[in-house]
Image (spheres, rainbow, N blue to C red):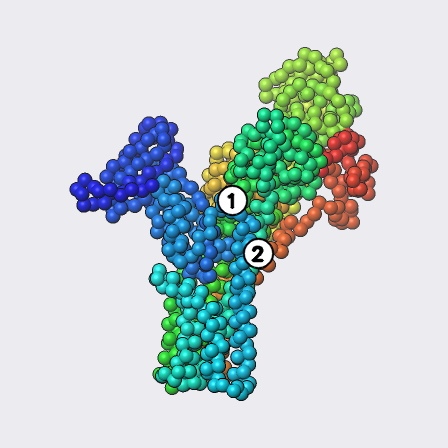
Amino acid sequence: MTDEEAGEHGTEKIRTAELDVSGMHCATCALTVEKALQNVEGVAGAEVNFAAERATVRYDPEKTDLADLEKAVEESGFGVVHEQVTIRVGGMTCAMCVQAVEKALNRLEGVVTATVNLGAERAYVTYNPRVVGVEEMKEAIEEAGYRYLGTEDEYSGAAERAAFERDLRDKAVRFSVGFAVSLPLFAIGILEIPLPVPMDWFMFLVTLPVFLWLAIPIFRAALRALQHRTLNMDVMYSMGIGVAYGASILGTLGIVLTPEFLFYDTAVMLASFLTLGRYLEARAKGRTSEAIRRLVGLQAKTATVVREGSEEQVPIEEVAEGDMVLVRPGEKVPVDGEIVRGESYVDESMITGEPVPVLKSKGDPVVGGTINKNSVITLTSTRVGKDTMLSQIIRMVEVAQGSKPPVQRIADRAVTYFIPTVISIAITAFLIWYVILGATLLFSLTVLISVLVVACPCALGLATPTAVTVGIGRGADLGILVKNGEALEISEKLTTILFDKTGTLTRGMPRVTEVTAFGIGEDALLSMAASIENNSQHPLAEAVVAKAAAEGIEPEEVQNFDTYSGKGVAATYRGTRVLIGNRALMEEQDASIPATLRENLDAREQEGKTAVLVALERGVVGVIAIADTLKPDAAQAIAAMNAMGLGVAMITGDNARTAAAVAREAGIDRVLAEVLPGDKAREVESLQKKGECVAFVGDGINDAPALAQSDVGIAIGSGTDVAIETGEIVLIHDDLMDAVASVQLSRKVMGRIKLNLFWAFAYNAALIPVAAGILYPFFGITFRPELAGLAMALSSVTVISLSLLLKRYIPPATQRTNQEKEPEGRHIAIDPVCTMEMDTKTAQFTAEYKGKHYYFCSPGCKRAFEEYPERYL
């Protein structure tokens, strides 16, 4: 922690701080950091411990601060290690409360950034743990007048839900009693019902206890705000109801005012409307974080650990990395791990969205939160606690929901000036009506009260965070993980989508697309090629063997296997010498290529495919075309991007001819070919310099520089193997249509934020002048304080309700299904083994499994499916 001590001269205050430094590899690095710190003005001394990776700095806080020290470390090429914590905060009611909490936290020495989400009621703090701790943050929040409800690590869903329900019940009772008292009194006043006692004293005695019960929490919150020199909703509303009730008391007692100044029922009704508004607001805000609660609910609470041969059920927090964990049928997999014993189907739908359970056996990875379906498995835990994939996803969604897109700065700036402006308008309107226009004091006070209670900064404060919270939660439901609110805003402004080819647009693995034989049968050619290639580890060889397996052809033994580096292989098959390779090998071995096959060879190469030639002693007898085939949804995704008005380009390290062929098949006009992996980021930067707003879509494996350079990096994963560290947007499913859906979701969320902001501004811009009496001289229309209070209560609820509609949003790209479709009168199905499109009216090979019909292009695919159906579903 930071210490203060007397300086050398005994008068100045010298502070000592410790920084954890990352990136140091040797003693020279430590000296570099030390020198950088010592060069900062105000630093009295700096020492860097390379072994502990820690810098100890003595500095004068009047000349420099922690931010300057960290900047010096970072500018010297190293990093400062920070920690992040999510704190639950209670008692916030409007955007000014958010600013008050943020200001209190950001004032703490050691806090790097602190952002608060009003909708989620969370503070997201990045801090230096050697300078400041959570205890200091707690004190800062409470001193600012708000409730510290614990960190996310202390999260107890049941406890928080119980507290939330108690708060709702309390608000419901308060506004119910308030309306039960104020509405009859309002009716008595309007209908002028005679009473056996004076009206003013009757109302005073009936409303006093109810008003105090309702208003004291509002007055208390306003007092706390004023103590911290902050103007918030409570201050403004306290002025409104305070003036109303105070004027009524003065009128009743005959001090300055007369008995006609009766606002007792109005004051109680206004306090009831505020409480009702906050009740509805709390209920709606509670629904914005349902996505997080669902994710947290997926986590197992206990685990069965095998220790020294005996089973022991322990809390999930006690499971350590390397523990043997037993999972029975129907139980949740408690942690990420690798199966060491047993085989079972595992339902991964809660993580991947895929409805069909996946067969898992020894050596396969499993993810915490998934469900074991039908057999006992034992696994070794590989990631536990915060390191599990589910915990990382939860953390990512939480941080993203707490982030602020740049558009929120508009609302933040507006809210800063909003309340002082409204108070000024209220006082000015009162003076104009009473002093200048000569209106009655009763009318002028009514105008003052109406302006104070109709204005609502809450709507402005909730417009952006509720939409971001619900939108990012909806994305998580769809398998689209958005890391921050800024990604949402930038995604709306995209002009170009740059797709990596291998593994993103294509399957990332070569497949045999055609087999052409000359003088022998195709099955004989495939058997010969597979038998020889079965001895090679080359990806093209594996593609040939896989094709043969799909056709039901088993490899045979061969002799005298030999390789020709970069050209092909040779072996003796059934007593005959066979060559398999490219043109160069055939020319080198004087294997002639028949004219018919030469035409076929030229055509395949023109399509960008790799042509593997098979030759016997008399010459070439066949061509096997191999290509990294497009994913089934690639062309559809590209067409959808084009339809959205986005430019689409493909980048690849392949040669121009192969790249052009793939791009042509996918429907892409713009191709960047022969680009080395390290140069992809430079190509992205080149597009940006031309004024393009670029999204890069890659598999997140070797695209990190390009993903980082792009305006929005979209990392497309593959089920539970997704690398969630990469990209601003991470797609859990290996589905290119989700890339389209992520852009559509971003546009929808940003559209909803703008709609919310429009209504929030329009509401205040329209109703404040009406409450101030601007229409009264022309139409005799004025705004009763009771109606002003109702309008205020409904304004923020309207904004939250608009945000909650995002929970039902389904991006058009995800509305498609894998069911059979009928383009141009044809029935199309996908062969589940080779993923080839089949016309079901002409398909010859079919099978039935679990009540569904499946169609196949060949008997080999059908046999493979019948043997291991779950592998292909």
Packing grade of label 1 (10 A; few <14, some 14-19, many >=20) is some
Tell me the amino acid under the disc marked 2: Arg
Assess whether mark 2 and mark 1 are in contact (beta carbons under 8 angstroms). Answer: no
Query: Dividing the picture into quarters, in which one does residue 97 lie?
Result: bottom left
Q: Is residue 470 left or right of residue 237?
A: right
The residue singled out by tag 2 in the image is: 287
Q: Nearer the viewer, residue 114 or 748?
A: 114
Q: Residue at x 51, y 51 (%)?
A: 401
Q: Is residue 795 visible?
A: no
Q: Nearer the viewer, residue 811 or 307?
A: 307
Query: Dividing the picture into quarters, in which one does residue 805 lie?
Result: bottom right
**Rendered image: mark on residue 16:** none
Q: Nearer the viewer, residue 139 or 873?
A: 139
Q: Is residue 817 visible?
A: yes
Tell me the amino acid under the disc marked 1: Arg
Residue 351 position, x and y percent, is: 61, 42
Residue 626 position, x and y percent, is: 67, 30
Q: Residue at x 62, y 37 (%)?
A: 333
On screen, residue 755 above or below 655: below
Secondary structure at numbered mark 2: helix
Secondary structure at numbered mark 1: helix
Residue 536 position, x and y percent, is: 64, 20
On screen, residue 376 above or below 214: above
Q: Residue at x 38, y 41 (%)?
A: 129
Q: Nearer the viewer, residue 744 or 674?
A: 744
Name which of mark 1 and mark 2 comes first in the sequence. Answer: 2
The residue singled out by tag 1 in the image is: 395
Residue 616 position, x and y percent, is: 72, 17
Packing grade of label 2 (10 A; few <14, some 14-19, many >=20) is some
* Quarter occupied by the N terminus: top left
Distance from label 1 to label 2 (Cα)? Answer: 19 Å
* Quarter occupied by the C terminus: top right
